[in-house]
Amino acid sequence: MKEIKNFSQPSDNNQDHFAAGTRDCLFPELILAKHKKRKFMFFEMALDALLKEFTVIVILLCPLLLSAQLAVTVSPPNVIAQKAMVQLKMKNNLAQAVKSARAVCFLLDDKGSMAGQSTKWVIGQNHASLVPKGETTFNFVITSPQPWTTTNLTAKVSFSLVVLEGDKLADVRRDVILQTAGN
């Protein structure tokens, strides 16, 4: 086994080995380590550049992806005696007209239990279809046999069916975006 000398301190015997460039020749492991470090740094820089490009692409495409939808704004319930009204404001950002849409509205009390529900055709059937870029409003009216025990009710709306022009079905999970009023 070879004995490795300490070349960190120059002595009379190894003074000439510290001339420019000769240190790396004495330690080939250093050359290999530097090469691996450079390769890693290049890979890291390339990955950073790729992530930056991907981020820019996503930022530029997001408005296009988000605009192709049926945007629905759900207002808080308005409680009057034994009735609660939940207003839906809908805007068709799809390329096709929405022929009909069916939704269910759940009313939840402050404990999270269901206080009432209603399922209705919010577009179509007895209502006009919604043309592209068109807007409409629908009022869910939910009645209760007894007066509401609380006025602190929350509305949860879910669309079960959206039929487009030409009797094509829309993917409600992807094409319908629900948001609460004020957000």
Image (cartoon, grey):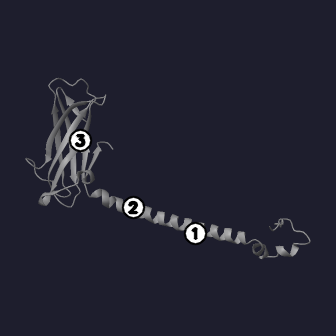
Label 3 sits on what residue type? Val
Give the residue number, with chain letter if any, for mark 2: 58
Circle nearer the N terminus (3, 2)? 2
Residue 18 placement, left or right of 101: right
Q: Residue 60 in the image: state x and y as whole percent.
A: 38, 63
Label 1 sits on what residue type? Phe
Residue 26 placement, left or right of 83: right
Determine contact: label 3, label 2, CB under 8 Å.
no
Determine contact: label 1, label 2, CB under 8 Å.
no
Q: Nearer the viewer, residue 39 or 109?
A: 39
What mark, if any, has residue 180 been given in the picture?
Answer: none
Give the residue number, with chain letter if any, for mark 3: 157
Q: Quadrant of the N terminus?
A: bottom right
| Of labels 3 and 1, the one closer to you | 1
Q: Quadrant of residue 153?
A: top left
Q: Nearer the viewer, residue 35 or 59?
A: 35
Residue density around tag 2, few if under 14, some if 14–19, many if 20 or more, within 10 Å? few
Q: Residue 72 in the image: state x and y as whole percent.
A: 24, 47
What mark, if any, has residue 42 been given in the picture?
Answer: 1
Q: Residue 175 in the image: state x and y as whole percent.
A: 25, 54
Circle nearer the N terminus (3, 1)? 1
Residue 110 placement, left or right of 148: right
- Looking at this view, name the residue that lies furthest to the right: 12
| Disc 3/disc 2 C-alpha distance (Å) | 29 Å
Q: Nearer the viewer, residue 34 or 63?
A: 34
- Looking at this view, name the residue that lies furthest to the left: 126
| Disc 3/disc 1 C-alpha distance (Å) | 51 Å
